[in-house]
Every structure is written in structure tokens, then in C-alpha cells.
Amino acid sequence: MKIAENFKIYKPYGYLSQFINNQTTRKNKKLLGELFPFPEGTMAIGRLDEDSEGLLLLTTHRDLSERVRSKKIEKEYYVQVDGLVTNAAIDQLQQGVNITVSGKSYKTLDCAVRPLSQAPLLPVRSKKIRDERHGPTSWISITLTEGKFRQVKKMTAAVGYPTLRLVRVRIGQEFLNGMLPGEVRSVDFFAL
């Protein structure tokens, strides 16, 4: 019986959370396999958009993928939004907001949201985010147990604060913990 191999990676901005580009029109995309010689059969557990970054778990064990993506495992994101987020907007996010998923209206589940008093210590993103001349920004932490397509971005936009930068910092008890963009760590098991 083959032993599963597990990895955690800081997915950099500009990379797809996959190993094969199945897009026909945009063939020059950066893929995870360019960052590390992963063993055959490695798959990403969940996804991060091309313009999102942060913690991504990878494994060769198919059943583990389903467990991590379940609603039992929390995923925490640090989100830089356009404008100074209000307590009213945070309350709305916590109680769930209506977003569109696959063309249908969907109300997100209750979640934990808190303002961050200062910008988190994160590596500088490879593509510059607009500067203060275009108005103030603020940072919040959002912890979800679900993961709909572009959910966090849709949620912040629904309350009037578009997302400028999105970094996943935690999945269960696995943390980004000072990793740098593109860094890959082999792990024996995931602390979920």
C-alpha cells in the first residue's frame, strides 16, 4: 500500500491552484507544478483564485481532500478591502450575506469576522496593490466553514467593500506561519 504524501504551500499571487492548464484561450498560466517536483497524483485540497494567495494543502490521498473541504474544517483569510470597514459591515458579514453562486442567489453561513487593527505581516505581493492616494484601505479576518466560488470577494463586495488582497492564513490547525510565496513544506499529516 502506497503511503500518502502531504504538502503545504504558500500559493503565490498569479498561480493557478492546479497542475494542468485546461484553459484553451489562456495557455501561458503559471501552475503549482512549476514550484516544486510534486509526486505523481498530487492534488490541491480546495482552491485559491489566481489573484489570491496563501495557504494551500496538497496530498496524494483522495479521501483527505473531501474531509478538509467539509464544513467541519475552518478556513481563515486575511482580507484587505477598499475603504475603512464599519462595524455594521462586519455584523452583516457575520450574519451571512446574499451572493450569487452558479447564477443563483445564495445566503452565506454565519462566520467569524473581525477587524485587524493593523496590516498583517505578509510578504509584499508580486503585483502592486493601489496606494493610499486612491483612498484608505483596511484589513479584516474572515473565518469560514464553506467555500463557494470567489466567496470572500463576493461577500466583501456585497457589503460595499471590494477585496483588494486575499490571503488564506489557516486551514483547521495548519497555519501559514511565516512561509514565503512559493515555499513548499512536506508534512507527515495535517493538524485539522
Image (spheres, rainbow, N blue to C red):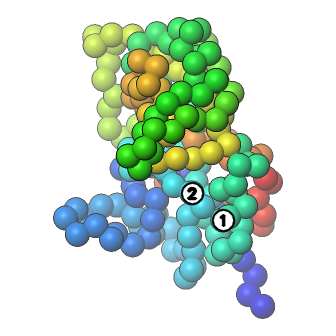
Q: Amino acid at mark 1?
A: Ser
Q: Secondary structure at mark 2?
A: loop
User: Considering only vertical position in the picture, is 3 above or below 35?
Assistant: below
Task: Out of 70 and 179, give the one closest to the viewer.
Answer: 70
Please name the residue shown 53% across and 27% down the image.
97
User: Considering only vertical position in the picture, is 68 above or below 180?
Assistant: below
Label pair 1/2, CB-CB below 8 angstroms: yes
Q: Residue 169's quadrant in the figure?
A: top right
Is residue 9 in view? no
Tell me the residue that label 2 is attached to: 46
Q: How far separated are the C-alphas under marks 1 and 2?
A: 8 Å
Task: Out of 66 and 103, give the one closest to the viewer.
Answer: 103
Residue 137, image x and y in percent? 42, 15
Residue 19, image x and y in percent? 44, 70
Q: Secondary structure at mark 1?
A: helix
Residue 33, image x and y in percent? 45, 69
Task: Out of 20 and 5, give the one closest to the viewer.
Answer: 20
Tell me the residue that label 1 is attached to: 65
Is residue 33 in view? yes
Task: Out of 192 and 111, give the one closest to the viewer.
Answer: 111
Q: Is residue 1 left or right of residue 156?
A: right
N-term-proximal mark, 1 vs 2: 2
Please name the residue shown 46% across and 10% down the image.
84
Residue lying at the far front in this picture: please name it. 104
Please name the residue shown 42% across and 20% down the image.
161
